[in-house]
Amino acid sequence: MVYEDQILSILSSIKADIADLKERQIMIQADITCLKEFRDVTVKSANKIWHGKFIKETADSDPAEFPDSASAAELANKYWVEVFPMLQKAFSGIIFNLLINQLTPLYFKDNLFVLKCDGDYKKKHIYVQCLPEITNCLRKVIGLDIDVRVISNKDLHSKSTNNNITQIKITPETPESDLAELTDSTQATGLANKYWVEALPLLQNTYSDVVFNAWIEPLIPLRYEDNLFILECDREFIKTTIKERYMAKLTSCLRSVIGQDVDVSVVSSDDLRSIDD
């Protein structure tokens, strides 16, 4: 009987080890997928620059669509390449990679520098979080008191413009209809940023370095209001993984920092893009 009990104990231990190894294998496979996604994004971003010039990725960047043909587009490309290192130092790695690095320079004319982003949701983030610093950096590089505006693909492809940027109304200031929304968004985003910065050290101590670096740190705090904390991730599979494996501890840490029984929601860039469409 003693030997049987020992054998059963050993078998039980082996089964537990096998289950643990299987779980580790799943985590490693997920991390590999994440790294491949990051590699693809990095390669795509790197391909934008070649010999000091941005490569036009689509017909949207055709200089024929710009005022004064290619000259305005070439000036924008030139100054954007020059300002890039300055912007990289001005913003955190997360904000730079997900917002700044995704911008495309369209044209620079009459002291107006126009940039294009993927969607309206990113445009609002850039106006709230990044535009003053982008403007400041471009003014230093160009040496003029310029204005900077951001338009989305949706603006560019609207039926009224027929893909012609010269027909897009670019006002000197943020449209008045958006001011209230941007003010509310600024407050909610500011709170989210504040609490997220405070929560990061606690989250770093909660998760392993691999998990924290691959899954938690890249999250972007979108807004915090009405006891709902919203985080954004870059891909749908990242959202699913976080919800299934890391949401409980993530929520616990944020509740600890905020001091309230908050709910946490994770949305992907695809979710936000579908709202724009």
Image (tube, grey):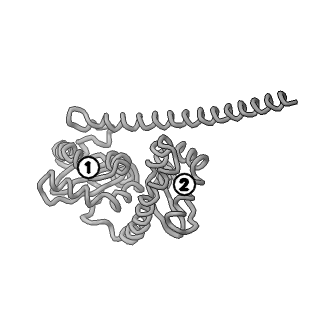
Quadrant in the rendering for residue 179: bottom left
Taking the image as shown, residue 89 lies to the left or right of residue 42, namely left
Indicate whether 254 appears above or below 22.
Answer: below
Amino acid under label 1? Lys
Dot placed on the residue nearer the N-terminal end, 1 or 2: 1
- Measured as percent of width and height from the top left, residue 129 is found at 34, 60
Indicate whether 126 appears above or below 20.
Answer: below
Q: Is residue 159 visible?
A: no
Q: Toward the viewer: 182 or 239?
A: 239
Amino acid under label 2? Leu
- Measured as percent of width and height from the top left, residue 53 is found at 22, 37
Q: How crowded is mark 2: few (under 14 residues within 10 Å), some or many (20 or more)?
A: many
Helix, strand or loop status at disc 1: helix
Taking the image as shown, residue 111 lies to the left or right of residue 152, namely left
Query: Which residue occupies 75% across, 30% down?
Result: 10
| Image quadrant occupied by the N terminus | top right
Taking the image as shown, residue 198 lies to the left or right of residue 96, namely right
- Residue at image mark 1: 89
The dot on residue 75 is none
CA distance separating discs 1 and 2 = 29 Å
Quadrant in the rendering for residue 82: top left
Indicate whether 18 appears above or below 176.
Answer: above
Query: Which residue occupies 65% across, 35% down?
Result: 20
| Residue placed furthest toward the right | 1
- Residue at image mark 2: 250
